[in-house]
Image (cartoon, rainbow, N blue to C red):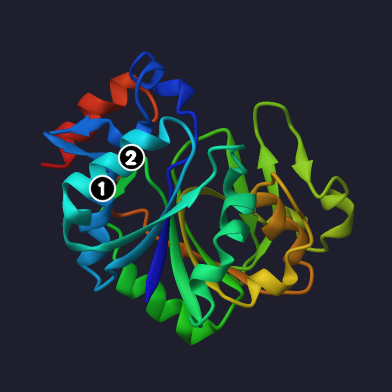
Amino acid sequence: MKAMLFAAGLGSRLAPFTNDHPKALAMVNGKTLLERNILYLQQFGITEVIVNVHHFADQIIAAIAANNGWGSTITISDESAEVLETGGGLKKAAWYFANEPFFVVMNVDILTDLDVNAMIALHLQTKPLATLAVTQRTTSRYFLFDTNGLLCGWRNTQTGQEKPADLATSCANYSQLTQWAFSGIHVIDSAVFSKMEQTGKFSMVDVYLHLMQANAINKFDHSKGKLIDVGKPESIAQAAAIFS
């Protein structure tokens, strides 16, 4: 099985570090986020990983070469010309998953103890187009799932925006939808590539919100585990206290 790490983002929230470095190379207890997630995926037998790069791409490429991929075979998806966001970045890397029935995707700035094998087992049992890792934590943007665990929409609680825009009237069980915070980890069926209609720069959130109308997109709840988004300078210290 193969995986993709999204590492192309500017990481502006992590400034001033990201003024001169990519967020993937931010250090937590002496190890970069990139190294930590390569080693994390190895725990589940995933040793073939494609990493997309844009911001200070040369530093990421050099770190991978200097450390021999930390024991994994790492392929680079070069987005130096233009960062493509999560959807565009995944679509650009579609060739890498040509012979895979499904694969794992995660953000490089997420640290977690989520059991990927358990998430894959649920995905294989329920056979959706994608399974999304979620928790019941507080944030401002949520995926909305129905009582069967199927994705039905998205909400920004700060602005009140919902997607699709007519969700309140088009969803028969609107009042029963529950909010779940996305953890940035996906198990995705390779059939997704033939269904993506967007081109260029676009988000996987928009892909899911479009495809959920005709395809099952499930959730995997790991609320009882550890999770931290290492997106701000103060989160480095928080992560260091959680992950040795």
**Mark 2 — residue?**
60
Q: Is residue 81 above or below residue 75?
A: above
Q: Residue at x 16, y 49 (%)?
A: 67
Q: Looking at the picture, which amino acid does disc 2 mark?
A: Ile
The answer to whether one can see residue 183 in this image is yes
Q: Height in image: 35 above or below 117?
A: above
Mark 1 belongs to which amino acid? Answer: Ile
Q: Name the foreground residue: 222 vs 194.
A: 194
Q: Quadrant of residue 20?
A: top left
In the image, residue 122 above or below residue 202 = below
Residue 8 image point, x, y percent: 48, 40
x, y (%) of residue 143?
Answer: 61, 51
- Estimate the x, y position of residue 116 in percent, counting from the top left: 33, 67
| Residue contact between numbered discs 1 and 2, judged by CB atoms under 8 Å | yes
Can residue 230 be seen at all in this image of the molecule? no
Instruction: Residue at 67% x, 56% y: name it.
Output: 177
Q: Give the number of the disc on residue 25.
A: none
User: Which quarter shows the C terminus?
Assistant: top left
Which residue is nearer to you in this view: 141 or 190?
Answer: 190
Q: How crowded is mark 1: few (under 14 residues within 10 Å), some or many (20 or more)?
A: many
Give above or below for 226 relative to 216. above
Instruction: Write the residue at 78% across / 74% down.
Output: 214
Label disc, if present, on residue 64 of the rendered structure: 1
Q: Is residue 155 left or right of residue 125?
A: right
Most distant residue in the bottom direction: 125
- Give the side of residue 18 with respect to residue 97, left or right: left
- In this rendered view, identify the residue nearer to me: 195 or 53: 53
